[in-house]
Image (cartoon, rainbow, N blue to C red):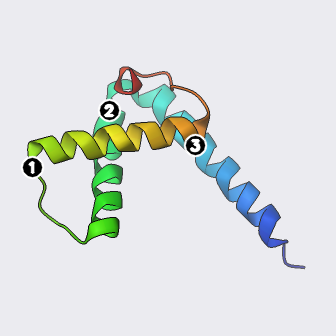
């Protein structure tokens, strides 16, 4: 029997949070580049833009950090989220 959509979404979020928590715990500062990539992918999806200045990369990184903090419900355990 198929799971209810709300239950599937809740399970997916729990799985994602668990994987992000594991990455933060095991990787420490190695998580910076995946966060940059996440931010750039978000910016590309929103604008279609594929080239970014250093300032724009910094802004999308900071935005991605804020989004991950909100998703996780805390600041993380690595210096990348400081």
**Which residue extends farthest bottom?**
1
Q: Residues within 10 Å of mark 1 (few under 14, many from 20)?
A: few
Q: Nearer the viewer, mark 2 or mark 1?
A: 1
Judged left or right of residue 2, residue 21 is left
- Image location of residue 53, percent across then percent down: 9, 49
The quarter of the picture where residue 6 lies is: bottom right
Q: Which residue is mark 1?
A: 53
State the residue in front, 73 or 14.
Answer: 73
Residue at the spot 78% in from the left edge and 71% down from the top edge: 5
**Which residue extends farthest right?**
1
The secondary structure type at the circle numbered 2 is: helix
Q: Which residue is mark 2?
A: 30
Alpha carbon distance from label 2 to label 1: 22 Å
Q: Is residue 44 above or below residue 80?
A: below
Judged left or right of residue 24, residue 43 is left
Q: Disc 3 or 1, which lies upstream in sequence?
A: 1
Q: Residues within 10 Å of mark 2 (few under 14, many from 20)?
A: some
Q: Disc 2 or 1, which lies upstream in sequence?
A: 2
Residue at the spot 27% in from the left edge and 65% down from the top edge: 44
Residue at the spot 62% in from the left edge and 33% down from the top edge: 73
Q: Which residue is mark 3?
A: 71
Q: Is residue 5 above or below residue 65?
A: below
Alpha carbon distance from label 3 to label 1: 27 Å
């Amino acid at each position: 029997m198929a799971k209810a959509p709300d239950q599937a979404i809740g399970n997916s979020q729990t799985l994602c949070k668990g994987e992000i928590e594991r990455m933060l715990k095991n990787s420490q500062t190695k998580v910076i580049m995946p966060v940059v990539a996440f931010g750039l992918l978000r910016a590309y999806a929103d604008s279609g833009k594929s080239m970014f200045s250093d300032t724009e990369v910094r802004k999308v990184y900071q935005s991605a950090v804020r989004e991950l903090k909100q998703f996780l419900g805390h600041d993380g355990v690595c210096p990348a989220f400081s």
